[in-house]
Image: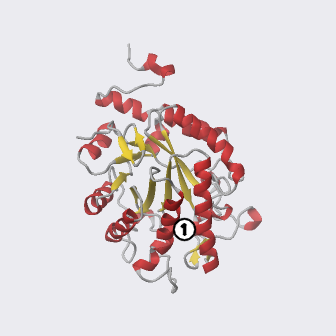
């Protein structure tokens, strides 16, 4: 029976345990470039024992950033420092993953600690785009609907980013199609009001994501894992549902996706979501059982026993930790101690493995 510290195989990659560090925006880059903050932030999670460490949402184009402080991978110059990070992660026994993203109508925002509101071009921002013309949060301005030419450019941007991710040494790629960002906006009828081949029916609304997945899979070697993060539910009537997610997961599985990272929300007001421990785990369990694809569970998973139960009960194959990892970068090592698993510590930290 699998448990939190069983290895997980995704194609030719072995994760030493079932704990992944979820993408968490740091808003600390300049012109998309990673720096020492990202090296320490991501590297410390590898030192802390996670099986998989995934970068924050990494923009495939400048206009795909959430904020001017986001990581980017839209030019070759971004590769060297990212390679420094992946080398460190791999030297410390974890696997480096990258989340490729486009923010859509949520782009061009100020950093959260600067208020998070829309940043105008005069403030260093830019004009956001979306599946359809869409109101920006807390603002009377609107995102522009992507043209057909713009859609093809987005596809090319994801393909180019995947090539750069390989050059930077990443061993897992995750495509971000959740949380109200561009690809999620195409999926959801709350945003997508298009009347062309990318709007209307379910098959049309998933077309952009399916195309990006197929193009990305074609770039990757057969032994290279591909993950997609989705919002399994919009949480509001008339929006995307878990049944839609099951149908999407079947298509993604057929097109070479190895694991569905099951988050939710991003287009509904927070008050519409009943948040609590494990509140999103049922999405991962449902998709896993109905589709037969591996899934990752997220959302207020803070305790070792809680994370272990998700794996032992076969509700998901991977547990993604976010805020708890910020509170405790050594969560995997402390969880192993609590659950009685003998795992390898960094040799520099062995003296602390047993309390004396």
- The image shows residue 131, relative to residue 161, as above or below, that is below
Residue 36 is at least partly visible in this image: yes
In the image, 28 versus 56, the foreground residue is 56
Quadrant containing the C terminus in the rendered view:
top left
In the image, 134 versus 56, the foreground residue is 56
Q: Residue at x 46, y 76 (%)?
A: 205
The image quadrant that residue 82 belongs to is top right
Task: Report x, y in % for residue 37.
Answer: 63, 39
In the image, 171 versus 193, the foreground residue is 171
In the image, taking residue 112 as reference, residue 123 lies left or right, namely right
Quadrant containing the N terminus in the rendered view:
top left
In the image, taking residue 29 as reference, residue 304 lies left or right, namely left
Task: Report x, y in % for residue 167.
Answer: 62, 48
Judging by the rendered image, the residue that carries numbered circle 1 is 182
Residue 180 is at least partly visible in this image: no
In the image, 131 versus 267, the foreground residue is 131
The image quadrant that residue 87 belongs to is top right
Task: Report x, y in % for residue 92.
Answer: 51, 31
Task: Report x, y in % for residue 23.
Answer: 50, 49
């Amino acid at each position: 029976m699998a448990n939190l510290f069983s290895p997980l195989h995704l194609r030719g990659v072995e994760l030493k345990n079932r704990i992944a560090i979820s993408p968490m925006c740091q808003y600390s880059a300049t012109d998309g470039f990673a720096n020492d903050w990202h090296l320490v932030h991501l590297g410390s999670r590898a030192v802390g024992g996670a099986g998989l460490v995934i970068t924050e949402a990494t923009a495939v184009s400048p206009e795909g950033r959430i904020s001017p402080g986001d990581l980017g991978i839209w030019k070759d110059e971004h590769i060297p420092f990212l390679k420094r990070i992946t080398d460190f992660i791999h030297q410390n026994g974890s696997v480096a993953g990258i989340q490729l993203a486009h923010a859509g109508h949520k782009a061009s925002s100020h950093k959260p600690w600067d208020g998070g509101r829309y940043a105008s071009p005069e403030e260093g921002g830019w004009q956001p785009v979306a599946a359809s013309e869409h109101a920006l949060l807390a603002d009377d301005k609107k995102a522009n609907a992507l043209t057909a030419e713009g859609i093809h450019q987005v596809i090319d941007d994801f393909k180019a980013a995947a090539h750069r991710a390989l050059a930077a040494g990443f061993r897992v790629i995750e495509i971000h199609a959740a949380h109200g960002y561009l690809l999620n906006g195409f999926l959801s009828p709350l945003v997508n009001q298009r009347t062309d081949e990318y709007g209307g029916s379910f098959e049309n609304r998933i077309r952009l994501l399916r195309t990006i997945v197929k193009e990305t899979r074609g770039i990757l070697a057969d032994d290279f894992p591909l993950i997609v993060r989705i919002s399994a539910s919009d949480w509001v009537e008339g929006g995307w549902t878990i049944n839609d997610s099951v149908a999407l997961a079947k298509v993604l599985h057929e097109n070479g996706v190895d694991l569905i990272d099951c988050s939710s929300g991003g287009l509904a007001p927070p008050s519409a979501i009943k948040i609590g421990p494990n509140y999103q785990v049922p999405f991962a369990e449902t998709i896993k059982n109905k589709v037969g694809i591996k899934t990752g569970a997220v959302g207020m998973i803070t305790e070792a026993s809680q994370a272990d139960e998700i794996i032992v009960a076969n509700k998901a194959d991977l547990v993604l930790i976010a805020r708890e990892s910020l509170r405790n970068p050594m969560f995997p090592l402390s969880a192993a101690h609590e659950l009685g698993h003998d795992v390898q510590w960094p040799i520099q930290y062995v003296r602390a493995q047993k309390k004396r």
